Image (cartoon, grey):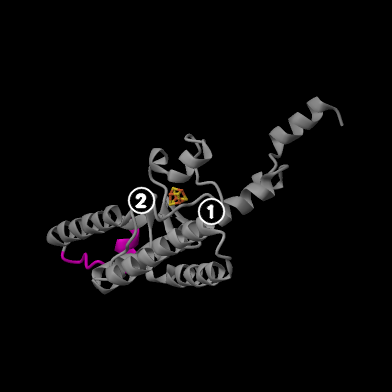
Amino acid sequence: MGAVHEAFREFQYPTPPSARPGGAQAKFLAEVNAEEAERNKDLVLAEYRRYQQGEMPSGPGARDLISFFASVDGKLARAAAEDPTVVGSDQEVRALLAEVAGVLHLGVANYCWFIDPSKALCLKLAGTPNATKPPAGMCDSARCPQATHHPRHRPVWAESVRTKQVFIGSIGRNHKTEKARLQADVDRDVKVLASIDAAAAA
Ligand code: SF4
């Protein structure tokens, strides 16, 4: 079949997007993204409900997240004042949380709220300030202003402390610098654990 004939046929009977080369992958990707968006909304909703119970997030980005949740409180209160049928249902709250759910990335030991790339410590460390998402394996959540820690991350930090302490115990006396470096890491992890506990109990 000639190219002109083929083009004419495509005009008469357009190929559905999913049947075009790459169409199936694009469709699959869109489905994955949609599922991720829903999962993120569920996670943010769960954190918002914890915040309402007084269980706060911790970490360098906690203050921003708490003020965002406070702004959601305000929006709900204003909406309820205008319309008494607004009761802060999960559905209503999910709609208000969509904004931050869209920028949430799940780290192993933290949540990453990738709102402003210029504040992302990982991008500074990687030397890629214009990247549109965080690079894998570069997160330093204890120091990044876009990171928060939550009770679900506690086991990872606790395990990190345990393994580093075991390692420090196995280092010989002659390796003082290495020992001191690891001890500083442990101290930082212990601080993160303490702040998770303190914020959750607030
Ligand atoms: S350092 Fe971690 S929390 Fe900060 S932007 Fe990068 S991935 Fe997100």
Magenta span covers which residues? 84-95
- Residue 89 visible, this orientation: no
Q: Position of residue 37 (x, y in %)?
A: 47, 56
Viewer-closest of 43 and 3: 43
Instruction: Using the image, determine if residue 50 lies above or below residue 2.
Output: below
Residue at point 57% right, 55% down? 31
Q: Which residue is mark 2?
A: 99
Magenta-colored stretch includes residue 94: yes
Note whether ligand 1 is within 8 Å of mark 1: no
- In the rendered image, residue 114, in percent from the top left (x then y), is placed at 42, 48
The amino acid beneath tag 1 is Asn
Q: Which residue is the extreme one toward the top?
A: 4
The mark found on residue 42 in the picture is none
| Mark 2: secondary structure | helix
The N terminus lies in quadrant: top right
Secondary structure under the numbered disc 1 in the rendered image: helix
Name which residue lies at 38% across and 71% down.
151
- The percent coordinates of residue 6 (x first, y second) are 79, 32
Q: Residue at x 70, y 44 (%)?
A: 22
Q: Which residue is mark 1?
A: 33
For the C terminus, the quadrant is: bottom left
Mark 1 / mark 2, whichever is N-terminal: 1
The extreme right residue here reads: 1
Q: Residue at x 21, y 60 (%)?
A: 73
Identify the amino acid type marked 2.
Answer: Glu
Q: Are marks 1 and 2 in contact (CB under 8 Å)?
A: no
**Quarter-of-image position of residue 13:** top right
Pick the residue in front: 12 or 96: 96
83 magenta-colored: no
